[in-house]
Amino acid sequence: MASARGYFRFDVVTATPGAGAVTSMGGLAVTPGMALEEVTPGDFDALVLCGGAIWETAAAPDLTAQIRAFQAAGRPLGAICGATLALARAGVLDHSGHTSNGAEFLASTPGYYGHDLYQEQPRAVRDGNLVTAPGTAPVTFTAEIYRALGFHNPDLEHYVKLYGREHG
């Protein structure tokens, strides 16, 4: 979000179920701009789901309707870390190349049948408008989201090289 807003000047809107405030695993308090139930592909260019441990619990929100609406509209759809479980539950990983925190992380997810399309790698995977990443790949995840939005320029390549340098 920092690079999207501060460096590349994208508009970013945060949304949560019921527009309720949330606290990240790291203790960051987020006051959303709107309710997730109001997010539609007609109003937004992409849907990006943040990771976190909640996705592994019964408290995880069911975002199937929003996920499928963005997929059906051909809008970029991304998930990193635990949020890939939401994509697996919605069935959108069953026909596209993808990655996550590990094949076994997704394997027992109800509704997931994309085992043969799973790619074990440390970088984000983009298959058309679908972007997935393990939690250890925030830089390539961000870059692939931007590319899925049609944003390609030398500044983006500089961003990937600069912020991914520690993994070189």
Image (tube, rainbow, N blue to C red):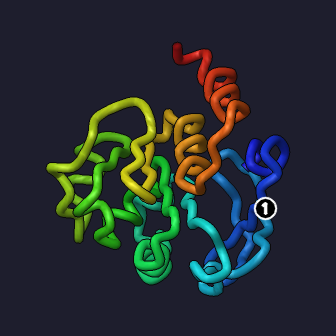
In the image, residue 119 sits, relative to residue 53, either above or below, namely above
Q: Residue at x 46, y 81 (%)?
A: 69
Toward the viewer: 129 or 165?
129
Residue 162, position as x, y percentages in the image: 68, 21
Amino acid identity at mark 1: Asp
Q: Which residue is mark 1?
A: 11
In the image, residue 157 sits, relative to residue 69, either above or below, namely above
Left or right: residue 50 compared with residue 135: right
Q: Residue at x 59, y 66 (%)?
A: 46
- Dot 1 falls on a residue whose secondary structure is loop
Pick out the residue farthest to the left. 116
Q: Is residue 62 visible?
A: no
Residue 150, position as x, y percentages in the image: 59, 53
Residue 99, position as x, y percentages in the image: 34, 45
In the image, residue 77 sits, relative to residue 4, either above or below, namely below
Residue 51, position as x, y percentages in the image: 53, 52
Toward the viewer: 61 or 65?
65
Q: Residues within 10 Å of mark 1 (few under 14, many from 20)?
A: few
